[in-house]
Image: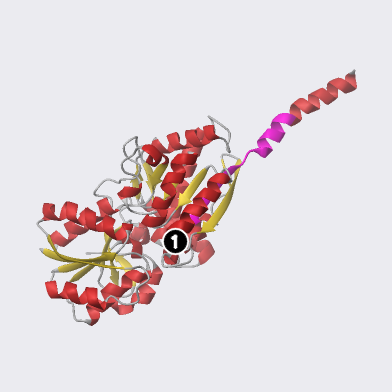
Amino acid sequence: MKLQALALGAAILVLPLTGSLAQEIKLGATLSTTGPAASLGIPMKNTLQILPKEIEGVPVSWTILDDGTDTTQARRNAEKLASENVDLIIGGNTTPTSLATVEIAGRTQTPVLAIAPSPGIIEPVEGAKTWVFKVPLGERELAERTLASMSQRGVKTIGFIGFNDALGEGWLKEFERFAPKFGITISAVEKFARTDTSVVAQALKVLAARPDAVFVGATGTPAVLPTAQLRERGYKGLIYQASGVVNNDFLRVGGKNVDGVLIAAGPLLVASALPDANPSKATSLDFVKLYEATYGPGSASLFAGNAYDAWLLIRNAMSSALKVAKPGTPEFRAALRSALEKTDGLAVTNGVITFGPNNHGIFPPGTPVMLTVRNGTWALAN
């Protein structure tokens, strides 16, 4: 009888332990670690590989897939991750690849954190998009800050050269939205493909319009092309770039041609120059220390920081979701989505994130800072 009681007691003790050990948070990511957007996706993957292995004592596992900067593959990756019952998907890291995940997020009711700038990924917040959140600063905030900078420098006319995809269209839409507010006219619009090796024709057409400034609505190293070809043809006006160029690959490929360009972006790479009261300063410096301890001095980039911001969002939301349901269940994914939507005043490398039922990723207008390239390095613009 005593033996039976002991055995029963042991079983009672073992069962909760077994349940705890079986619990695991499964996270997935579809990133462009090859293809034209690889200079964005690789540092994001690097960040995910050095993050803590648990949240609130619960183990975290990652499945990271390469979409090759291809929307069809991004969709396949999202389908695969959802079929494997991940609790959340990060991706894509471009506007087109992020848009490819939206339908899957809604159909499988899996939260998605897109690391891409277009408001179109999350707006309107209805249907499938109620499951999607945007992590980085977006085209809306960045375009308004860019145009404000142009206005302060006396710009009245601008040329636009952008990608011929959803990202380029998104930037153009926001420039058209805000340009009248600053008394600025868009005098030329040209487009090019991410895989193009020359944009001479587009550059010549923009030069013919004689704009005071040119904005390049492109990301990664392909964004060097318009700037280089404008400079090589003697353009002396201001050149502004999209925030998707803020990494060392852009500096390496662009060389002297990109010295002096201006970019509205998050403050990560100039965090040490920020006032101590800036809410992003401490978070940014902590991340740079973490990242460079593994990948070396000067290796941190805006895109690596965006992935870290996604992690901060996940960690913040998990604390309440774990109290509601067990990872790996539809109830947990719903709780996680709800917790993400209630994010309030979370300091990240890009600024301060506050979500809500009608806002899944738009930052306050004054969040971006103006960066420039000075002697081959990133610096705060004067």
Decide which of 129, 305 is in the foreground and name it: 129
Which quadrant holds the C terminus? bottom left
| Residue at 17% from the left image edge and 52% from the top image edge | 178
Residue 16 magenta-drawn? Answer: yes
Q: In this view, does 259 lie above or below 334?
A: below
Residue 329 magenta-drawn? Answer: no
Left or right, residue 77 beside residue 372: right
- The magenta stretch is 15-30
Q: Is mark 1 on a helix, strand or loop?
A: loop
Going by the numbered disc 1, the residue's amino acid type is Asp
Q: In this view, does 351 lie above or below 200?
A: above
Decide which of 183, 281 is in the foreground and name it: 183
| Residue at 18% from the left image edge and 55% from the top image edge | 176
Q: Position of residue 168 (x, y in %)?
A: 29, 60
Spot the residue most to the front. 72
Q: Is residue 304 above or below residue 125?
A: below
Q: Where is residue 247 in the image (x, y as percent from the top left)?
A: 38, 66
Left or right, residue 64 beside residue 175: right
Which quadrant holds the N terminus? top right
Determine which residue is flagged by label 1. 70
| Residue at 24% from the left image edge and 64% from the top image edge | 381
Residue 122 falls in which quadrant of the image?
A: top left
Decide which of 104, 117 is in the foreground and name it: 104
How many neighbours does mark 1 have within 10 angstroms: few (below 14), some (14-19), or many (20 or more)? many
Spot the residue most to the top. 1
Q: Where is residue 374 in the image (x, y as percent from the top left)?
A: 29, 72
Q: Can residue 132 be seen in this view?
A: yes
Q: Position of residue 239 (x, y in %)?
A: 22, 69
Q: Is residue 343 visible?
A: no
| Residue at 42% from the left image edge and 52% from the top image edge | 100
Colour mapping: secondary structure
Image mark count: 1
